Image: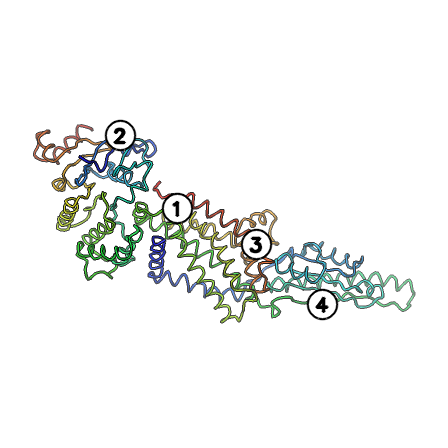
Amino acid sequence: MQMSVQVNNLVKRFGSFPAVDDISFSVAKGEIFGFIGPNGAGKSTTIRMLCGILDQTSGVGTVEGFSIKTEPEKIKSVIGYMSQKFSLYDDLTVEENINFYGGIHGLSRDETKTRRSWILEMAGLRGKESNMTGALSGGWRQRLSLGCAIIHGPKVVFLDEPTAGVDPISRREFWLLIRGLAKAGTTIFVTTHYMDEVEFCDRIAMIYRGKIVAMGTSAELKTANKVDNLEMLFVNLIRGME
Amino acid sequence: MRRILELVRKELIQTFRDKRMVGLIFVAPVIQLIMLGYAVTTDVKHIALGVWDNDRSFESREFVRKAVISGYFDDAGVVVNDAGMEHAFKSGRCDLVLYFPPDYSRNIKRGEKAKLEIIADGSDSNLTNIAFSYMAQIANIENARLMKENVSKMKAARGGNIMIPQVSPEPRVMYNPEMKSANYMIPGEIGLILTLITILLTSMSITKEKESGTIEQIIVSPLRSYEVILGKTIPFALIGMMIVLLIITGGLLVFNIAIKGNIFTLLFSSFLFLLNTLGVGLFISTISKTQQQAMLSSVIFILPSIMISGFAFPVSNMPIEVQWISYLLPLRYFFTIIRGIFLKGAGFAILWPEMLALFILGVTVFILAALRFRKKLS
């Protein structure tokens, strides 16, 4: 199986505090890999290291074969990243946001135009092209943010808590979009703290205090630990660590 | 290139969309223009004095000595002729020149009226007025001395026919003959507003992206650091140039002040100056996490640099240590340049040392800032 993301013994310390503490995992091409854990567990820190936003303290990692340490600029041309805050410019219109992200990813005007109409369709924002982004509701912002993150057709998409603060219906629609992307061959690396979203992932890793405490498919984890509820499993694992 | 253009365009859209910001950028200069036109009066010391002595006598040297020991004038080195004087004024080395005609001492010895000329730069009308009145006082003291000397001679001659000589200074103004203070303040305002607006806009636009998290999207894009830096500075350089043109137009329409020198020299110098302010803005953004921090750091930098670079108070009036510091401030050179171009029609030939200083300072601060500006989160 071809690996899209591979991480070995990755560590990130802020001062003496280990935010990410010696984790290893790999994600196959076209797989939806879920990173589950509470706030402050190290999910965002891991994503940021993989995207080349943050330097790692030690360990190795590759994304699409490029080293996160020595080739972060190459990684940036093959990935899409959607941060927790749905990084959009509130004082730009929907269309201006899309044009900007297309532009900084080096898309030509024609390419941006094609992708723009796809994004507007996908996000259900047709007819709202000239609305101010700051005035959009949560679900729309989320889908526009996703659209901008994948405007250049990346091979791997990193989504950092993409469903936080979004209503249940929008969350569901969002996951259908994600599944569609994966089916088309895009690797998805997603973090969440909603346990019910585990079912949308092909494989998950549970992370707590910077360490991976369990990893596998939802079914594997349930049978191996003899539970029928992953939330219980997570609570039990954490209790074991206290 | 296309990526930089996209950044520039986005930045301009954002800046002009915020109506309050547009007000701040373009209305504030106009208000200041009008306020500063009706200027500030300040006390003056250490006026840079040049001497054009065609008499080379004890009497002429005595007059200069009196001027210097008064504490109000500093000898700036000898000015020998007409061309030398013009250069000294245009480069800002002299504020005032004393001209002694060849018959100065002869007239004194004969007991006649000895004329001398006080030629002032005149750009700074406040300084010129004060300098003239100081010179008049010094002439009075000299006349009192001559009187005393000749009274004893008179006594010795026992009522013989002794004429009492008198020195008579004649003031003349080189530039700004109407002596309007606006002529001095308004070119200065270009430096003032450019400093304020470009440092604030640059530092705040980058910290704003840090606050909203959009900086992360820029970091994960394939944009290179230099592209981000250019994309974040070119828009404000453009706005800066628009402000320069606005003030030039405003000065012409409201105060009827036309540029004596070449407008392109002025724009070129403004560009050199912008290298400095944009570099400082960039640097501030690398040490600030929030817009408030950026604003405060900017003000901390801007205020003293306006105070000690010669905007309202002559640099020569300041303690020597402060004058050394002012050599590091781009604004000091820029004030000399814009006043030189605006009021005296100076050009490259005269102002090149200041332009070179601006260029060197600007490139240095810009490179320092660019090195600190890494495309990473700390």
Residue B288 badge: 1
Distance, label 4 to label 2, CA atoms, is 87 Å
**Residue at mark 1: chain:** B
- Residue kind at label 1, given as amino acid type: Ser
Location of mark 3 (residue): B354
Q: Nearer the viewer, residue A31 or B213?
A: A31
Same chain check for tags 3 and 2: no
Mark closest to the chain's N terminus, 1 or 3:
1
Is the residue marked by circle 4 packed among few (<14), some (14-19), or many (20+) residues within 10 Å? some
Q: Nearer the N terminus, badge 4 or badge 3?
A: 4
For residue A155, what is the image quadrant? top left
In three-dimensional space, the C-alpha distance between marks 2 and 1, rounded to whole angstroms, equals 33 Å
Please report contact status of discs 4 and 1: CB closer than 8 Å, yes or no.
no
Q: CA distance from mark 1 to mark 3?
A: 31 Å
> Of callouts 4 and 1, which one flags the residue occurring earlier in the amino acid sequence?
4
Q: CA distance from mark 4 to mark 3?
A: 32 Å
- Label annotation for residue A9: 2
Secondary structure of the residue carrying tag 1 is loop
Residue B99 against residue B200 in the figure, above or below: below
Q: Residue at x 44, y 59 (%)?
A: B240
The lab-note entry on whether marks 4 and 2 share a chain reads no
Drawn side of residue A219 relative to residue A190, left or right: left
The answer for how far apart the CA atoms under marks 4 and 1 are is: 56 Å
Q: Amino acid at mark 3?
A: Glu
Mark 2 and mark 1 on one chain: no
Query: Circles 3 and 2: CB distance less than 8 Å?
Result: no
Q: Residue B170 shows which numbered tag? A: 4
Q: Amino acid at mark 4?
A: Glu
